[in-house]
Image (cartoon, grey):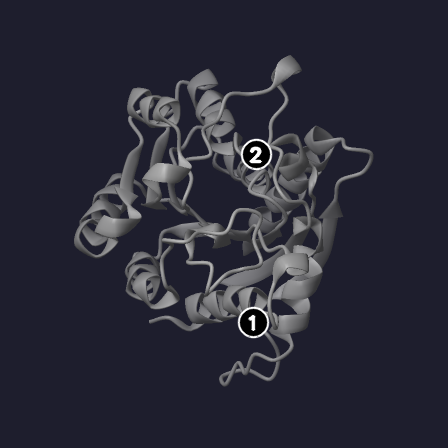
């Protein structure tokens, strides 16, 4: 399968969530780091770069709709979308396109993240970087479709009691960061067994600050990259992933581009994993 790379240059969701802005520069930093990747098996990167979708005048909703349209086009052209954020509000726009492509088919969601991103919508039903998977849940429920969401790497002290309750009410599956090595692989197997299509999201704030300082919300007790590589292999082996995004890259807070390098190496690893 060919891959279509698309940036979502947006900070608006993070700003609405009172986070540290800077992720709109993520796609640019990602592409700079991507130039240093050796692909080995090809003369050029194994994807087509379709440029960026940007957010203008704080109109996040319009930007998400545009991202959804571009994702739909990519999928209709038999390419797997690889979206680089931007805050995790990227996910809602990304899923709009996936949902239009799949129609009434179900789709499982696997998210590597320190946060549930199930926060309540703001006034006038405005979304933020903390709401995308709640918005996806509402979108699925409006079509009488299942919302099957697995989050890997949850930090208990970075999510409120109310968010754990929301996760419980929505029947969200999750694995705490401290239990990743024991519980993640079985949880992944279960969701893979339930679905023919999987949307995979990687929020860079799932990693420890030493590995990923360039994010809006750095994690003192986050994961280390080597912990998720076997899980990515497991997911890739299923041949069920139809869309991937890597989000929350904020170059202004990075050190020696190590977060950008992590993001690009994760993509390279995914593309070459057997």
Mark 1, Cα crowd under 10 Å, few <14 / some 14-19 / many 20+, is: some
Tell which of 181 and 220 is nearer to you.
Answer: 220
Residue 162 percent location from the top left of the image? 38, 22
Quarter the C terminus occupies: bottom left
Determine the residue positioned at 47% across, 26% down: 134
Residue 117 percent location from the top left of the image? 46, 34
Residues marked 1 and 2 touching at CB (< 8 Å):
no
Mark 2, Cα crowd under 10 Å, few <14 / some 14-19 / many 20+, is: many
Determine the residue positioned at 37% across, 28% down: 147
Residue 51 percent location from the top left of the image? 73, 57
Q: Which residue is mark 1?
A: 46
Does residue 77 show up? no
Determine the residue positioned at 66% across, 41% down: 67
Q: Residue furthest right?
A: 57
Which quarter of the picture shows residue 187?
top left
User: Which label's residue is closer to the chain start, 1 or 2?
Assistant: 1
Query: Does dot 2 land on a helix, a strand or a loop?
Result: helix
The dot on residue 202 is none
Query: Does dot 1 land on a helix, a strand or a loop?
Result: loop
Which quarter of the picture shows residue 5?
bottom right
Determine the residue positioned at 52% across, 29% down: 131
Height in image: 261 above or below 63?
Answer: below
Is 220 on the left-hand or right-hand side of 250?
left
Does residue 167 show up? yes
- The alpha-carbon separation of the residues under discs 1 and 2 comes to 25 Å
Is 112 on the left-hand or right-hand side of 231?
right
Tell which of 33 and 222 is nearer to you.
Answer: 222
Is 58 on the left-hand or right-hand side of 178?
right
Q: Which residue is mark 2?
A: 96
Is 35 on the left-hand or right-hand side of 177?
right
């Amino acid at each position: 399968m060919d891959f279509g790379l698309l940036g979502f240059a947006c900070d608006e969701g993070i700003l609405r969530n009172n986070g540290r802005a800077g992720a709109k520069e993520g796609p640019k930093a990602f592409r700079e780091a991507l130039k240093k990747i050796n692909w080995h098996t090809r003369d050029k990167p194994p994807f087509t770069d379709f440029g960026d979708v940007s957010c203008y005048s704080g109109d996040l909703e319009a930007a998400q709709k545009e991202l959804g349209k571009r994702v739909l086009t990519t999928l209709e052209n038999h390419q797997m979308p690889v979206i680089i954020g931007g805050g995790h509000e990227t996910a809602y726009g990304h899923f709009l396109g996936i949902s239009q492509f799949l129609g009434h088919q179900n789709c499982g969601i696997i998210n590597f993240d320190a946060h549930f991103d199930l926060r309540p919508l703001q006034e006038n039903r405005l979304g933020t970087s903390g709401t995308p998977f709640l918005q996806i849940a509402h979108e699925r429920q409006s079509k009488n479709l299942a919302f099957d969401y697995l989050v890997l790497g949850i930090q208990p002290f970075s999510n409120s009691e109310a968010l754990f309750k929301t996760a419980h009410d929505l029947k969200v599956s999750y694995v705490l960061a401290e239990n990743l090595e024991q519980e993640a692989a079985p949880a992944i197997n279960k969701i893979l067994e339930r679905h023919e299509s999987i949307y995979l999201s990687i929020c860079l704030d799932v990693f420890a600050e030493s590995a990923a300082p360039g994010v809006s919300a750095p994690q003192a007790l986050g994961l280390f990259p080597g912990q998720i590589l076997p899980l990515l292999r497991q997911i890739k082996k299923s041949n069920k992933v139809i869309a991937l995004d890597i989000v929350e890259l904020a170059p202004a807070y990075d050190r020696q581009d190590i977060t950008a390098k992590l993001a690009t190496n994760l993509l390279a690893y995914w593309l070459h994993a057997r």
